[in-house]
Image (cartoon, coloured by chain):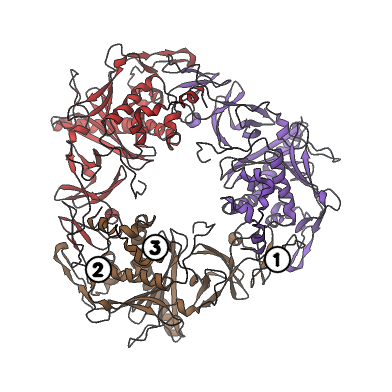
Chain colours: A red, B brown, C purple
Amino acid sequence: MALAQRTSARVSPSRQYAPYIEAVWGLKNHWYPALFSNELGENQVKGVLIAGHEIALRRAKGKTYAMQNRCPHRGVKLSGKPMVLTDDLMTCWYHGFSFGLDDGVLKTIAGCPDDQNIGRVRIRTYPVQEVAGIIFVFVGDENYKPVPPLSSDLPLRITDDPNPVKHLLDPDVFVRGIHRTGKANWRLAVENGYDPGHLLIHWDSMMVNSQDRLIPIGVEPVREDAVRFIDEPDGPKGIMCMYNREGAWKPILENPLVKMKAKGKKPYYFRVSTVLPGLLQVEHWPIPGWSQLEWYIPTDDKHHEYWEVVVGPCRNEDERSAAESLYNGFFEPIGLRGFNDADLFARESMQKFYEDNAGWDEEVLCMFDNALVAWRKAVSRFNRGIQEAPRICEEP
Amino acid sequence: MALAQRTSARVSPSRQYAPYIEAVWGLKNHWYPALFSNELGENQVKGVLIAGHEIALRRAKGKTYAMQNRCPHRGVKLSGKPMVLTDDLMTCWYHGFSFGLDDGVLKTIAGCPDDQNIGRVRIRTYPVQEVAGIIFVFVGDENYKPVPPLSSDLPLRITDDPNPVKHLLDPDVFVRGIHRTGKANWRLAVENGYDPGHLLIHWDSMMVNSQDRLIPIGVEPVREDAVRFIDEPDGPKGIMCMYNREGAWKPILENPLVKMKAKGKKPYYFRVSTVLPGLLQVEHWPIPGWSQLEWYIPTDDKHHEYWEVVVGPCRNEDERSAAESLYNGFFEPIGLRGFNDADLFARESMQKFYEDNAGWDEEVLCMFDNALVAWRKAVSRFNRGIQEAPRICEEP
Amino acid sequence: MALAQRTSARVSPSRQYAPYIEAVWGLKNHWYPALFSNELGENQVKGVLIAGHEIALRRAKGKTYAMQNRCPHRGVKLSGKPMVLTDDLMTCWYHGFSFGLDDGVLKTIAGCPDDQNIGRVRIRTYPVQEVAGIIFVFVGDENYKPVPPLSSDLPLRITDDPNPVKHLLDPDVFVRGIHRTGKANWRLAVENGYDPGHLLIHWDSMMVNSQDRLIPIGVEPVREDAVRFIDEPDGPKGIMCMYNREGAWKPILENPLVKMKAKGKKPYYFRVSTVLPGLLQVEHWPIPGWSQLEWYIPTDDKHHEYWEVVVGPCRNEDERSAAESLYNGFFEPIGLRGFNDADLFARESMQKFYEDNAGWDEEVLCMFDNALVAWRKAVSRFNRGIQEAPRICEEP
């Protein structure tokens, strides 16, 4: 194919981050968003797929529970035809196997209350936390202990900024967003979101052009400290592109060979970081003072669930109302959909090349991909386990 | 997953009925329904798929013939673009290879009558019988001899009932029904139909509720003789749930843990049996004096053809007319479709769990599943052969 | 299955043309049509798939270029979201990698002009020729030298005919046609087109019946010279059915066993030949003085691109206008679509039988298949290489 590729084939570059290459099904023992709170009403049952784990979510008396979404009796999905009989049990619609929401233990079988399996069979449950309008589930090994705090899988709290963006766990915060399925492995999605070199796909974006923002054609990392690791004790782990470090990055404003010049006039400050298990934070985006979060959640080996959330300040009802308007008229249609549709297309375009894992060795990386290599190394260093392929998994 | 599963993994429970577990493609050397008589008009050619056998059906001068549905010349389906030239030949539409309907021997090639293959090449034919408006084909090994009587693969003739339901081979019988494709292996379909524990999926059925029938939440087999083998000399083999044996089954009328109570007031007698190769008979269903038959016919490894037939008495034209009305207004829309749609959904919900055969070891069976285990053993004991996977098979 | 098959299984008949059996992905180092000229406008980029090669076509200043359709950086298709910035570069839409149209060398990266890969990485380009309104690409090994002349992969120039049909490279020629995707391996498509025995599928064709052409039921090759090899020095290689050789073929005008008689009264002369890499020429078809060409181009292992082209004389504007009318009102709707739809159906009907390659041994060939066996031997003898399966290939 290419000269550089042939050479590189001799010493596989992916050897530097082997665990990342193995993480086809994602990272385990991490907190993942499962649903927005308003997607799960009282007494509803819904199924989600996270890193190959089929999980049934159930809300009872306001509290949310998560358990294995296969009845061990005949293997049907509990969420297939939800049956809600009491507040403390999840009942399978097929034969009435009824499991404790709290502990997963088989408490009775509707039409077979004398069965000897009762009290002896158990299905696994998953830790759940619900904050900022999002239901998070801790997915991985059943016996992983202790379960780390949710905050360790949330974005870095920003402190080195005179006007720092809000953190998801802050009070007075406005959080809204969407999620949808992308036909690409989660790693391609993370890399696309974090990629310092992908400005070109947004070249024609209404969002940036309508605001006359100064968009360079690209950025070249020119110093060792262009990218830094995030490694907070008991906190998030990942990497950050230090676009705010004077002289660490060289913006490319013109390239005569392709007849391109930077567009827009207004300089615009933003900074991106990505933390495990695959969560992007873009500070001061889509507008200053706000931030955009994106989770790229492994579902199966060929799909991810793409979460796009905006986070902003909201101290009172007036600000909430204004934020709602901004979200509905601008953030969601122009940003999360219009702007990010180009990203979804780009990820899906990479899938075939990487699908059999050979792409990780064949790819020809360039300067700005240092940021991606740093991410791959961060995953390899900080992950709490590489998720194994499941026995059963229906397409999302 | 579940405690019970881990234990059972040590000694695989499916060892007790290994042939059943192997029967992914169904049982061979049995009679299967292929089409309703009125689905095959004079001179029509239609293709069916039974246990991986691709079979072309042809009616000529009223008689029905069945033969291999691939032309040995270039492997196209004879039914792909039916070509009917004479009453004694099946001609392939592509190159005119013409086979004797009776013996499958190549009798001529339309445009190549001097070819040396003529008289020497043969395709296989299948025994056919047409009774009660149904075309049956004997499917399995070409040289299986003697071909057993059709009645050995039909339901047990009921004698231990003061008002026994009609048998398919009786005179004065009304037979009508439908068939459709289910996306599940045939064994899951049989087990669903015969399952004593699946009452819950019919809990909201208009058919039972509108008639105020007394439906327990479930039934527990409490004596050894709750289920009996059917093993008639030269007749059907299978099992029967002896719901009519006083004290053999315990109906569950209430389960406070799931806040359920039996519905309806009118006690209702019915009994179910299943015989090889996969045929359910429900006596006195959908109404007393009638019976419902259901075949779960393996097509490929992941699909079955679901036949639903009602059988009732019909001694004269008036009774026929009344039966027609009952069928069109009640049996088909409310019973075969409305009621049984829930069964089709249930079977398809099990498919993923059993698809790689691991489900047979992982499942956690309970009391009422004894009836299913008995069926699995009956198949393992009485089958006339386990069907091998075919070389070619297009999805049904 | 059939007696003859069992016998033949002892000595596999396909041993006589083993390279042909291996050519699942087609023949390499041959010229293939990629697009009609009018399908690629100035500055357009379009992707095609030929024998597993993903190729991006680009027209710049009227000239057509062909190159590998995967960017080596992250493996996306260049044609996925065409980006045309200058006349001499193909720029990838994702990160701006820009390759010389002439040599495939990475000349710059839009937003990363200082990258060390520039000038060192290269993607492969393919030789292109554009004649008679068709863009041809030479597909195969990158270093195959010398590239043979295009004419060596075009039809045989006809000389042994008082009124010979035109050659594609002639001046004063009218060439028009269509192409579409067929769901069958390319070899089944070639064999269907060239097949002397497939008259039956056109038995009801409006095209032949409306013209009262004499159509025999079939033809039997009765002499050794019924089929001849085409083996021109530096020219096309393949085979020709010598329908014009008196006494070489016996037309079958009647077969009482299937009650068929030849239709039509007007004798009609045509002759067919097929040359590598899979190109049919039917002389004097659809009407005398014209010819029909058909390419069966391997795309992936289960699909081919079916090209149907008519070639006729056209010396001036009046003749061009008349030819246009004939093409639009007759050749395309009645011939290329109506008539040839039956061929497309036939090929797709063979796919399952041959898909796992067992069909080549199981098939039961007859007299007129000698012509096909000759073609298989011609491919085995004259091919310039058997195409290997590609690492990546998206369905056409």
Which residue carries the number 1 mark? B120
Q: Is residue B279 above or below residue C4?
A: below
Q: Say whether disc 3 or disc 2 marks the residue closer to the N-terminus.
A: 3
Which residue carries the number 3 mark? B21
User: Residue B311, located in which quarter of the rendered image?
Assistant: bottom left
Give the Cα separation between the discs numbered 1 and 3.
39 Å
Local SS, label 1: loop
Give the Cα separation between the discs numbered 2 and 1.
58 Å
User: In this rendering, does residue B301 appear at all?
Assistant: yes
- Looking at the picture, how far across and down is residue B334, in whole percent? 35, 69
Q: Is residue A313 above or below residue A106?
A: above
Identify which residue is drawn at 76% across, 59% down: C263
- Looking at the picture, how far across and down is residue A380, in whole percent? 30, 30
Q: Nearer the viewer, residue A335 or C147?
A: C147
Residue extending farthest to the front is B10
Q: Say whether disc 2 or disc 1 marks the residue closer to the N-terminus.
A: 1
Q: Amino acid at mark 2?
A: Met
Q: Amino acid at mark 3?
A: Ile
Q: Are marks 3 and 2 in contact (CB under 8 Å)?
A: no
Q: Amino acid at mark 1?
A: Arg
Which residue carries the number 2 mark? B367
